[in-house]
Image (cartoon, rainbow, N blue to C red):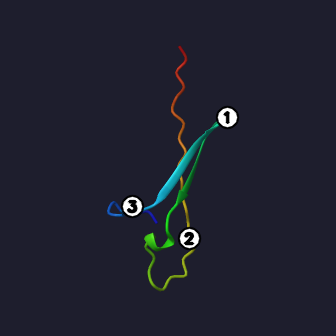
Amino acid sequence: MDKEDGNWNAVWESKTRIVENGWIVEMRIPYSALRFPEKSNAPLVIKYVQEYPPIQLE
């Protein structure tokens, strides 16, 4: 789980919208685009990162 795959190049869809307190993203990634070993009992884990840039007041 600690290694990233820079070769992953799947077709997926996303949609965003701005809401009162930020924004929302919905993503559709086909299960077939995810690479799993043929025989695996490993759980599906999804990670995401949320970062806030510093606010500069003028």
Identify the residue position indicated by label 3 in the image. 4
Whether the residues at callouts 3 and 1 have beta carbons within 8 Å, the answer is no
- Circle 1: element type: loop
Gap in angstroms between the C-alphas marked 3 and 1 = 34 Å
Gap in angstroms between the C-alphas marked 1 and 2 = 32 Å
Sequence order check, earlier mark of 1 and 2: 1
**Category of crowding for the residue at label 2, using alpha-carbon neighbours closer than 10 angstroms: few (below 14), some (14–19), many (at least 20):** few
* Amino acid type indicated by mark 1: Glu
Whether the residues at callouts 2 and 3 have beta carbons within 8 Å, the answer is no
- Circle 3: element type: loop
**Category of crowding for the residue at label 3, using alpha-carbon neighbours closer than 10 angstroms: few (below 14), some (14–19), many (at least 20):** few
Residue 2 location (% of width, % of height): 44, 63
- Which residue appears at 52% of the width and 29% of the height? 54
Identify the residue position indicated by label 2 in the image. 44
* Amino acid type indicated by mark 3: Glu
**Category of crowding for the residue at label 1, using alpha-carbon neighbours closer than 10 angstroms: few (below 14), some (14–19), many (at least 20):** few
- Which residue appears at 55% of the width and 62% of the height? 46
> Which numbered tag is attached to residue 10?
none
Q: Nearer the viewer, mark 1 or mark 2?
A: 1
- Circle 2: element type: loop
Identify the residue position indicated by label 1 in the image. 20
Residue 21 sits in quarter:
top right
Residue 8 location (% of width, % of height): 36, 64
Sequence order check, earlier mark of 3 and 1: 3
Residue 4 location (% of width, % of height): 39, 61
* Amino acid type indicated by mark 2: Leu
- Which residue appears at 55% of the width and 81% of the height? 41
Residue 22 location (% of width, % of height): 62, 37
